[in-house]
């Protein structure tokens, strides 16, 4: 088994290039802020950011100037309000950020088509909506079996997908449990994949519970061990979501000066996630998950 373990700095330097289409997936759960911060620190340029629900990390990347375009289905600070850097960029005259909007299932379908190596994906959920009027990439076909007219979306094949997982072995076999989004589809659609994990485990641990392996190592280019890399998002079984951060972020992001101050201190001002955690004393104790162990499974035969 090839050892694919790299530092976050090296993984981003090797696999994220200027002009790439980048996906950092995770639905509320396992959103890799650490990877987004490293992309900002390395001052990548002209990226197309894609994600079902861009939240705070994409807002930070937009403010930092790494993004040229956003492909998405919903954008906001979950449960709180708007993404202020995103709004400033879109509402500027002229706009400084290009946008391409779909429904949630439209984005799922784009990644599913990419993962299946299909040119497009048919779906029904644009009936009665205005999204196709503002997005010319949403087209239609006639079903050859029923004659029904169906909407279609083109395959999305990112240059690089970054997925946060609870654990992986050195070969990149990544295991996830808890709430999942489209990490698997995004990884299989992508040309290059970086898996960031809370914990590196021996291959024997992965083999003991194979059904939990969401992304196999054959699809992975780099494994990065970055505990707390999803904060203020959460990692089931490791730490809870930092609700206070999301609420506080609204005030920070409203003004460019306070936004810049945050980036200077917590992104540019640290070299890695370990230094980030030192700047947040008490955070680990406040959010560390309490044990709640599921019963074992007998894989015998």
Image (cartoon, rainbow, N blue to C red):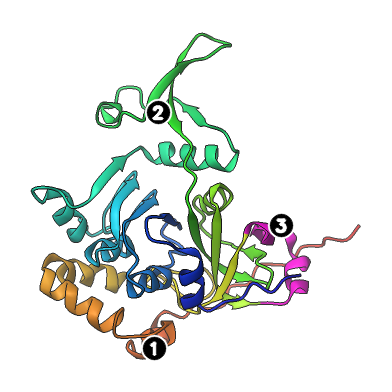
- Residue 41 sits in which quadrant? bottom left
Q: Earlier in the sequence, mark 2 or mark 3?
A: 2
From the viewer's perspective, is residue 226 above or below residue 97? below
What secondary structure is the magenta-colored segment mainly? Answer: helix
Name the quadrant of the C terminus. Answer: bottom right
Q: Along the horizontal axis of the image, is 198 left or right of 92?
A: right
Mark 3 Cα shell of 10 Å, populated few (<14), some (14-19), many (≥20): few
Q: Which residue is mark 1?
A: 275
Mark 2 Cα shell of 10 Å, populated few (<14), some (14-19), many (≥20): some
Pick the residue in front: 62 or 30: 62
Q: Which residue is mark 3?
A: 211
Give yes or no for contact between labels 2 and 1 (Cβ–Cβ under 8 Å): no
Report, in whole angstroms, how far the alpha carbon at label 3 lies from the one at label 1.
Answer: 35 Å
Q: Earlier in the sequence, mark 3 or mark 1?
A: 3
Whether residue 235 is visible here, answered yes or no, is: no
Q: In percent of the image, x 28 and y 73: which residue is there?
A: 245
């Amino acid at each position: 088994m090839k050892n694919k373990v790299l530092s976050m700095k090296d993984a981003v330097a090797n696999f994220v290039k200027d002009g790439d289409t980048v996906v950092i997936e995770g639905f509320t759960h396992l959103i890799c802020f650490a990877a987004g911060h490293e992309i900002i620190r390395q001052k990548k340029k002209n990226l197309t950011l894609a994600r079902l629900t861009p939240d705070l990390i994409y807002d930070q990347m937009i403010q930092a100037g790494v993004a040229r375009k956003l492909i998405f289905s919903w954008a906001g600070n979950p449960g709180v309000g708007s993404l202020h850097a995103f709004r400033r960029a879109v509402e500027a005259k002229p706009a400084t950020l290009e946008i391409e909007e779909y429904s949630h299932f439209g984005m799922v379908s784009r990644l599913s088509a990419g993962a299946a190596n299909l040119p497009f994906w048919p779906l029904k959920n644009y009936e009665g909506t205005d999204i196709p009027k503002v997005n010319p990439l949403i087209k239609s076909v006639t079903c050859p079996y029923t004659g029904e007219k169906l909407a279609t979306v083109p395959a999305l094949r990112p240059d690089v997908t970054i997925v946060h997982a609870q654990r992986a072995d050195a070969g990149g076999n990544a295991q996830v449990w808890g709430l999942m989004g489209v990490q698997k589809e995004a990884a299989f659609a992508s040309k290059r994949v970086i898996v960031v994990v809370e914990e590196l485990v021996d291959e024997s641990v992965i083999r003991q519970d194979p059904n939990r392996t969401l992304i196999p190592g054959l699809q992975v280019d780099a494994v990065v061990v970055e505990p707390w890399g999803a904060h203020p998002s959460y990692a089931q079984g490791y730490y809870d979501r930092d609700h206070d951060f999301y609420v506080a972020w609204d005030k920070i992001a409203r003004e460019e000066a306070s936004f810049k101050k945050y980036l200077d201190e917590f992104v540019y001002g640290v070299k890695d996630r370990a230094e980030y955690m030192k700047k947040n004393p008490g955070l680990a104790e406040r959010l560390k998950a309490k044990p709640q162990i599921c019963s074992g499974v007998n894989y015998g035969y």
